[in-house]
Image (spheres, rainbow, N blue to C red):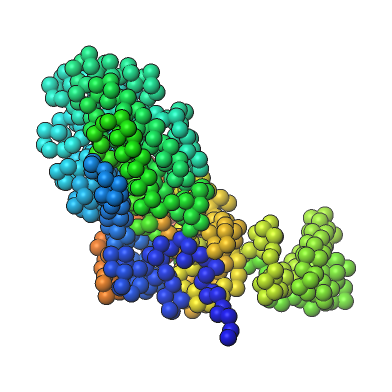
Amino acid sequence: MNTPKTAPHSVYGIDKWGKDLIVVTDKGEVGLKNPLNPKAPAVSLPDILSDLEDRGIQSPMVLRVSSYLESEIKHINECFAEAITRVGYSGVYRGVFPIKVNQQAQVVDRIVQFGKPYNYGLEAGSKPELVIALAHRLAWDALIVCNGVKDPEFISLAILSRKIGFNTVIVLESPKEVDTVIEVYKELGVEPLLGVRVKLTNQITGKWEESSGDRSTFGMNTDQLVSVIDKLRDAGLLHCLKLQHSHLGSQVPDVNDVRRAVSEACRYYTELTREGVPLTHLDLGGGLGVDYTGEKSATENSINYTMREYCTNVVETVKYAMDAAEIDHPTLVTESGRAVVATSSMLLFNVLEATLYDAPTAPKPEPDDHHLITDLLAISEYVTADRLQECWNDASFYRNEMRALFHRGYVSLREMARAERIYLHIMARIKHHAAFDDISVPEDQMIRLSDIYHCNFSLFQSLPDVWAIDQLHPMLPLQMLDQAPDRYAVLSDITCDSDGKIDKFILEDGVARALPVHTLPEDKPYYMGVFFVGAYQETLGDLHNLFGDTNVVTIELREDGGFDLLHEQEGDTISEVMSYVEFDPQDCVAEFRKMVDEAISSGALKSKERKILMSAYRDSINGYTYYE
């Protein structure tokens, strides 16, 4: 009996990180499974792209899958409900979504829609976010939790919103903010609903460790906390303090850190209660992570727990602490943004062209070849599996010697070109043997052997965390996954910036510096997908090289294996991004027209060329910022 061969697509580790949402179809294409209808067939992503392009919606685009968003909101609420029942907890769960994680209207609107059955609310960390939150009809018991620095206008709006039915909690961040709240209360004569942010000393591990511990930015230490309690008591407002907020951290990789932080938060809760504070809600902030790599380990881009385990740990820890202190179980609140929205969005783009670092053939020897060229050609005679490192060393040495001679003027341009092509051909031979004989290539050599695939997107606009903090996102080709990849590449965007590249990739056996890819087909586009980009990436993007927002499409997966287009947001035009940086597009057209007419007057431009040139300028200024 023959041992079954590993599927070609297994190199990308989809089974590890795909969460049964991202799969590979029988046609070798990336497919989207519907978690709300698991028996429904997967929908081919290339087919979705083809359908959208037929409708006039082109890549690059952010594709949002509302079914994934609905599933995650359902999952976190049901996991907390199950844990509460299983543990015998007498309180309830009331989650809120931090708007800062994804502020796009289509996302926030659907979170409110899908969260209503669970009394799911919103967290606002600024005045604009509070304005957004108050424009939504939330469920009767849903919260609006107001964090961050607040001016009198922010506080007035939050307090008065209670008069029209909102459960708007002002979380006090500092003793000074308490003074402002008291002043506004006296002016309005309306009591606020208050929370207090307690700074925990427990520090998490991982990429976001500085967001926790006593050096974290927000919250109060014990001395400040006592001062706030006294101020509220003196003002006759202590009875308004109902919620304790204690942020555990962001993307917490280790579940034991969750337990420790929750336990510390409970100590403050019990002590505040003994101080006479009538607390009813315990807000444990963010922290619930996403396993981007599928490693299931306590590493920067992974987590060693499931959502069900996270919820159980929180509920158990709070129950045991409150039972020991003989205190009623509080309403549990978390501000889990990343875990709710990350999986719901993906960035899709086409590869425009490739810079290949090998050559299929080498030039033939010539009688007057420089001896270094002859030495390079001779390497081909001993490129074998057991001498690959030797061949690499020799080829690099002779090529570098030729470059040194070229720089000093001792060899011609054509001689240098011959040497470079011979070198690239040897590299092709080395790569072939390494792949065929399954020989491991050192990481530094892999980078130098990798091609550059030039892709139609801006890293700075659509994947800012990849550039800024080395965030890893799963990515892979969307097609040809039934064929073994025959090349390795790094991905370069279309900005004119050397930082605009991706050179760290999640694979089955770990993180690699190059992505397995296929030779670009000549007769059809080659698409790439970057997954789990719903958290922060759409909000943090910048206008590097004035590449604006991509097209954004929201779809819903159907039970029959199809999809419905719910919403389309056209990407920025050039005129729109110009206005963002204070250029008036019409002024630019007028000034360009003047220069065109001056060129006609001087004879540099023909009159009939004016129409073509002006049309090209106007078409560009009204067009998509990306490659069309």
Which residue occupies 56% across, 78% down?
5
Nearer to us in this view, 585 or 444: 444
Q: Is 457 drawn above or below residue 486 in the view shown?
A: above
Residue at 21% across, 50% down: 118
On the picture, is 32 further left or further right than 360? Answer: left
Is residue 517 visible in the rendered structure shown here? yes
Say which residue appears at 24% left-offset and 34% top-offset: 328
Quadrant location of the C terminus? Answer: bottom left
Q: Nearer the viewer, residue 602 or 584?
A: 584
Residue 15 screen position, x and y as percent: 47, 66
Q: Residue at x 24, y 21 (%)?
A: 276
User: Residue extending furthest bottom?
Assistant: 1
Front residue of 168/494: it is 168
In the figure, residue 128 lies in which quadrant? top left
Residue 500 in the image: x percent, y percent?
Answer: 53, 53
Count of residue discs: 0
Residue 541 lies, in percent from the top left, at 42, 48
Above or below, 447 relative to 273? below
Residue 614's spot in the image, x, y percent?
38, 59
Q: Quarter of the image containing the N terminus?
A: bottom right
Q: Note whether 169 is above or below 307 in the view shown.
A: above
Residue 109 visible in the shown view? no
Q: Residue furthest top?
A: 234
Relative side of 312 to 111, left or right: right
Q: 291 or 150: which is nearer to us?
A: 291
Image quadrant in which you'd find residue 64: bottom left
